[in-house]
Image (cartoon, rainbow, N blue to C red):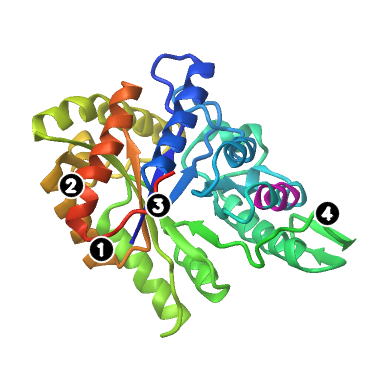
Amino acid sequence: MRFGVFSTYENPQQDFARCFETQTRLVRHAEALGFEEAWVAEHHFEPDAACPSILTLLSYLAGVTSTIRLGSAAVLLAFRNPIQVAEDVATIDLLSKGRFDFGVARGGPFELQNRHFGAGKDSTREMTLEALGLVNRLLYEDKVTFTGAHYEANGLSLTPRPLQKPIPTYLATTTPGAIRYAARNGHGVMAGPPFPIEQIKETLRIYREAAGPEGDPRFTMARFYFAAPRREQALAEAIPFLSRFAERMRGNFARQDGAAPASLTEEGLLQRSLIGDFDEVAEKIAAYREETDARAILLKPISRDAEKNLRSLEDFARHVRPMLGVEAAAAQ
């Protein structure tokens, strides 16, 4: 099992420059502690999560890190030109010297995104899968000709070409059709921090059924995280974030004229998070490993205090990871 960090560029002080500096420090600190991966989310029009330019952020991180793998979790393909995405993905792979993992998604229940990017919520799934097919052809084939319902190319050859062939590719999805698409095409699957374990297990069941005995979902799961010597310390840091997150997400569902999942509460999020004392967090990870055979778990530190988030990663490396019998990558 590998461990990484999940960066959503939280911005509690509403200071964007400080937010970018803080998240860069987090990723570099994770690399120095032996974490193997760092994944960046994509959000739009959300002052609490300042990461709309995901590929720009990953390009920058490629230049200030040297060994940690970098991933997009996830590029919202329906809101982008897939030809430009293919060019950017190839560029990041070259800049990172082949350390890039390409995660994509359709986007969550965010009405502003659908409206301002001109992608109706009922069409984003189809657009995402069609765009991904075109991106993958452009990355590895010469003179691509493609005609789909939403995108086209005519004898197009991409410049530059990526270093990895292929770049590891993942879908963040719970939709059966998209899961089967991932399985048929050899892509991995991802789960965000709020995903319930029952939903994750169903995703993996569908994937393995579609992929057959040789299929590998390379399952990667993100979880909200804060570990401390005592459970009460961890809860004091985590609860303000969980309350705010649940409120934000319920508001997003309401604006889409949909009902939020019943599990989208502070209590439900806490149950599905890696929050507690060191023993408790290690026990939860061991249970996830047994239930999902996860390839990697990504930690999203959620204190409003950036220094405490850094220390919590140190605590994970020093106290939690050794309990799991999983050695860290060589420290920088």
- The residue that mark 4 highlights is 159
- Residue closer to the observer: 3 or 125: 3
- Residue closer to the observer: 49 or 23: 23
CA–CA distance between discs 3 and 2?
23 Å
Q: Is residue 51 left or right of residue 190?
A: right
Amino acid at pointer 2: Val
CA–CA distance between discs 4 and 1?
40 Å
Asked if the residue at tag 2 contacts the one at tag 3, i.e. Cβ–Cβ closer than 8 Å, the answer is no
Confirm whether the magenta stretch covers residue 158.
no
Judge whether 137 appears above or below 39 on screen.
below
- The residue that mark 2 highlights is 281
Tag 3 secondary structure = loop
> Which circle's residue, 3 or 2, is located before the other in the chain?
2
Which class describes the residues within 10 Å of circle 2: few (<14), some (14-19), or many (20+)?
A: many
Q: What is the total number of numbered labels drawn onto the structure image? A: 4
Amino acid at pointer 1: Arg
CA–CA distance between discs 3 and 1?
22 Å
- The residue that mark 3 highlights is 330
> Which circle's residue, 2 or 1, is located before the other in the chain?
2
Which class describes the residues within 10 Å of circle 4: few (<14), some (14-19), or many (20+)?
A: few
* Residue 318, quarter of the rendered image: top left
